[in-house]
Amino acid sequence: MHHLMRLALVLLIGLVLLGGCAKDTVTAPDGASQASADGGETSAAATGEPPPSGSSTLSGQAPPPAEGDSATAGEGVSGEGDAALPPSVEDALLRLRLKQGASYTYAVLQEADGMGIEAKMLITVAVKVLSVQSDGAKLELRVADARLTEGNEAAQQGMKPMLDRIKGQSVEVDVDARGRVKSQSSLPPGSIFGDMLQGGLFRFTLPDKPVRVGSTWTHSANVSGVPGANRPIEYSFKVTGIERNGGRTIVVIESSAAQTMTTGPEGERATQAQVAMKVQGTLRVDAASGLIESATSNTETSVNIAGRTQVMKMAVLVSRK
């Protein structure tokens, strides 16, 4: 039961809706592909004034664009706002463009049902830009709040103490202009950031090449905190729209993953788990700053231990305040 509870918690607070990056291949709508191994070009500057955070809420959906209002974003976005995003340019080069001293707050609302657990959790992560370099930035991430808003007895006993422990945890991290983690400070035991920073900020890495509606790419992310997890999760992304929202250009990205893996100590079949996971999600990325505005996902995970299968369904909403 402890192994199952630990696995369930990692799946819940690991933000598995977003993918880290080992290698990514961007495919344009015409079928041409451009591959980049990890460590590829990151020449875009991570500077410039970020736009206002807007009015994203925890309602389950990002605010809709104005009727009939859409545009494509352009390569070489300067971070100076919509003037740098002429509608006539087809491709958008997504890069982090941050300002030293800027602060952001992300609310992560998660709902889970299965494996004996019924729970709703709210985790609030505060992000502060400590410094900005030509190829990235140093950030401080802090868990400002982590609480169980609703939960049955199993959730109260197993998850509430773990959420209490991660509250107040912080980490300093160096990221490049695509959001890939270059280095980070040491993590306390059981830190949420072990999973949150897998490959990229919030487990998401901006694509290497400019994208347009129809562009696709893939990422992979490891699962940390689960002993014996033997396969990374492979994610697929596709740009499905570009919207205007309050004067800002938002790139809409659909994400999906389907993966099976074995967890637990090798050779100990009684405690090993066969895990099958399916994920469907949507991200909205601010084209000027490269920051996630909001993200939603639905995950179904089945876990088989010693011939017994249990299923957990999760819904996650990430919103930048």
Image (tube, grey):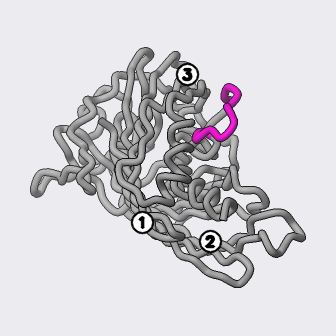
Looking at the rendered image, the disc whose residue lies closer to the viewer, 1 or 3, is 1
On the image, the x and y values in percent for residue 282 come to: 38, 59
Q: Nearer the viewer, residue 1 or 26?
A: 1
Q: Is residue 59 above or below residue 82?
A: below
In the image, what residue type sits under mark 3?
Answer: Ser
Local secondary structure at mark 3:
loop
Report crowding for label 2: few under 14, some 14 to 19, many 20 or more residues within 10 A (C-alpha): some
Q: Is residue 27 above or below residue 75?
A: below
On the image, the x and y values in percent for residue 157 come to: 53, 52
Local secondary structure at mark 1:
strand
On the image, the x and y values in percent for residue 38 come to: 69, 46
**Residue 134: which numbered mark, if any?**
3
Seen as rendered, the residue at the extreme right is: 267
Which region is colored magenta? 184-193
The residue at which mark 1 appears reads as 298
**Residue 259: which numbered mark, if any?**
2
For the N terminus, which image quadrant? bottom right
Residue 165 quadrant: top right
For the C terminus, which image quadrant? top left
Quote the CA–CA distance across marks 3 and 2: 37 Å
Q: N-terminal of the two: label 3 or label 2?
A: 3
So how many labels did they put on this image?
3
